[in-house]
Amino acid sequence: MSKERILSLPCWGSGVELEELSGGITNRNYKVSCSAGKRMARVCEDRRVLGIDRANERACQASAASLGIAPAIVYHEEGVLVSEYIEGRTLEDSDVKEEGTLARLARLLRGLHESRAELRGELLYFCPFQTIRTYVGNAKKLGAVLPDQLDAILEDLDGLSGELEPFRPALCHNDVLAANILDDGTSLWLVDWEYGGMGNPLFDLAGVSGNCGLEPGEERLLLAAYFGGEDPATARQVSILKAVSLLRETLWAVIQTAASDIDFDYAAYAAELFEAYRRAREELTRGSG
């Protein structure tokens, strides 16, 4: 989608100014200033190869917005999503690791996960294990270079899925990394709901730990803030899902090496994530020894 088409959308009013924002590795994002106020326009072309359903994304973001957790959707049409602009800063991993931020994020996620009775509409179910298997198939179709020993990794993945305890599904973001968290000075906000859906709440906690590179002590602080105390059994479940989350993110990056036209080194990112997955899997083995 061209800038000219974005400028021509019927939701702006007059005096439209467009500023492209850096940092997006799935979509292109623009800050739009106009007579109606400030808005965020995201060019979001079809990304079925990544498992993104744009109607579900909007439904999840709208649900989260009703809870005060995500920006409200202002307008959408094929290829673009316009949301309320949040005046704040995007967090870095180092920000997330601060004790105060971990506590705030835990409260935010707890509120999201406990919103079941308030949810309405059709929300897709998110299963990271199914996503990983689908990503492998899509990567092969694209001719992308997959990690070594993938068959053994997938067999191990099946074993890990059998270790998970039953859970009560909740609305989850499923892609909680620092770049998807905004801080307006008072509240935290979650943006980019492309992978949102009903799922295992622990996957969001595992995503924070894996994506932001939390140290063991930092992870314990996050879980204690979320649960109101320590629970070794639950911590083990989060550790399993952390490895799963990192593998899923690895394969996401692998697909992007062949599918994306954004100027970003997806191959290096995939290698970095795969190494993080291997460390998480080794820690899991040591923890059960």
Image (spheres, grey):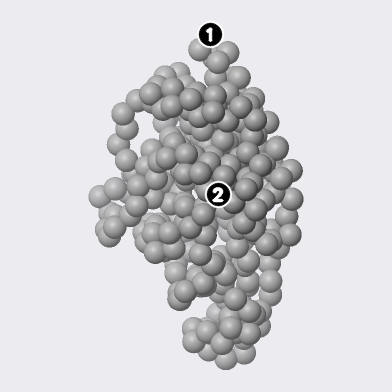
187 lies left or right of 250: left
Q: As displayed, is residue 200 above or below residue 92?
A: above
Percent coordinates x, y for residue 18 in the rendering:
66, 79
Q: Nearer the viewer, mark 1 or mark 2?
A: 2
Circle on res. 141: 2
* Residue lying at the far bottom of the rendered structure: 14
Task: State the residue lying farthest toward the top.
Answer: 289
At mark 2, the secondary structure is helix
Q: Which mark is residue 48?
A: none
Position of the N terminus, as image quadrant, is bottom right
Above or below, 158 against 194 in this view is above
| Residue for badge 1 | 289
Q: Residue at x 45, y 18 (%)?
A: 232
Q: Is residue 267 left or right of residue 185?
A: right
Residue 132 as seen in the image, left or right of residue 118:
right
Q: Quadrant of residue 4?
A: bottom right
> Looking at the image, can residue 278 be seen?
yes
Q: Position of residue 56 (x, y in %)?
A: 39, 59
Regarding residue 91, the answer to whether it shows in the image is no
Q: Residue at x 45, y 76 (%)?
A: 77
Task: Decide: is 162 above or below 124.
Answer: above
Look at label 2 and name its amino acid.
Lys
Q: How far apart are labels 1 and 2 at the CA level?
A: 38 Å
Q: Earlier in the sequence, mark 1 or mark 2?
A: 2
Residue in front for this viewpoint, 251 or 39: 251
Q: Position of residue 169 (x, y in %)?
A: 32, 40
The residue located at (47%, 39%) in the rendering is 133
Q: Amino acid at mark 1?
A: Gly
Q: Secondary structure at mark 1?
A: loop
Please tell me how crowded label 1 is: few (under 14), some (14-19), or many (20+) other residues with Cα within 10 Å. Answer: few
